[in-house]
Image (tube, helix red, strand yellow):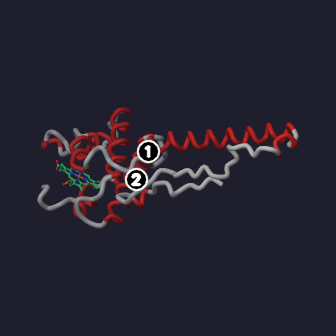
Amino acid sequence: MLLLSPTRSDLVRGQDVRCPGIVPADIGLTKSRGVDDKIPLQMKVLRTLVNTSIGLGIVTGMVGCSSANYSSKPTKAVDEVMQAGFKGKDPALKGSDSVAGRIREGNATPDDIRLMVELTRQLALNSPPKGELASWTAKTVALRDATKNLADHKPGALEIWKDAANCKACHSLHKPDKAK
Ligand code: HEC
C-alpha cells in the first residue's frame, strides 16, 4: 500500500518536516504475468482506472510538496514583516499609515489585505526571536487565520483581526529588548 509520512503541521515548525514520502511497493503498477490472460476485461479496465488515479495522486502530492504552502522555511524574517506591514512611516500618524493601520481603521485596499495574508503567513513560519514557541505559534497562527478570514469577508473578522494583531500583546512576550 501507499505509505505516507506525516505532512507539516503548524506545531512542528522548526523541525525536520518532510513532504509525503511515497513507497511505491505493492500499488499494482507492475503487472503480474501469467494470470493476466484469465482476468475478465472489466477487471482490467477497473485496474487501469485505479492505477491511473493512484498515479495522479502521487503527482498531485509531489506538486503540492514543492508549492509554497508546504514550505516550512520563511522567506521573510520577523523584522522584515514588521517593516513591510506593521510599522507606520510618519510617527505623528501613530501607525495609521501602515498596512496594519489601514486594516484596523477599515481603510484597507484589496492589495493591502493580500499583502497582509502573505506577511502573516510568513510570520507564522518564523520562530520567535524571544519567548516560548507555543505562545508564538498560537499568536501568529491566530493572526494568519484572522487575516485569511478578513480576505474571505467572514462576518466579525475585523474585530477578531484587531485582537490578533495587538502589537503590545505580542511584543511584550516575543520582541527582544534590544530591538526597540
Ligand atoms: C504576533 C507577534 C507580533 C505582532 C502582532 C506585532 N509584532 Fe511587531 N514585532 C514582533 C517581533 C517578534 C519583533 C522583533 C523582531 C526581531 O527583533 O527580530 C517585532 C518588531 C517590530 C518592530 C521593529 C522592526 C525592526 O526593524 O526591527 C516594529 C516597528 C514593530 N514590530 C511594529 C509593530 C506594530 C506597529 C504592530 C501592531 C500594529 C506589531 N508590530 C505587531 C512581533 C509582533
Across and down, in percent, residue 76 comes to 28, 44
Residue located 81% across and 44% down the image: 34
Quadrant of the drawing holding the N terminus: bottom right
* Picture coordinates of residue 134, whole percent (x, y): 36, 65
Task: Check disc 2: other Cα within 10 Å, few if <14, some if 14-19, many if 20+.
Answer: some
Mark sitting on residue 119: none
Q: Residue at x 31, y 53 (%)?
A: 126
Callout 1 secondary element: helix
- The image shows residue 38, relative to residue 140, as above or below, that is above
In-front residue for pair 134/21: 21
Percent position of residue 118, x then y:
36, 41
- In screen coordinates, is 144 left or right of 127? right
Q: Is residue 93 above or below residue 180?
A: above
Instruction: Give the labeled residue for mark 1.
Output: 69
Residue 8, image x and y in percent?
A: 46, 54
Q: Quadrant of the C terminus?
A: bottom left
To which quarter of the image does residue 43 belong? top right
What residue would you read off at disc 2?
160
Front-lying residue, 6 or 25: 25
Residue density around tag 1, few if under 14, some if 14–19, many if 20 or more, within 10 Å: few
Spatial CA distance of label 2 from label 1 is 24 Å
Q: Does 98 sit above or below residue 138? A: above
Secondary structure under the numbered disc 2 in the rendered image: helix
Name the amino acid type tagged 1. Answer: Asn
Residue flagged by tag 2: what amino acid is it? Ile
Residues at marks 2 and 1 touching, judged by CB atoms closer than 8 Å: no
Farthest front residue in view:
34
Disc 2 vs disc 1: which is toward the camera? 1
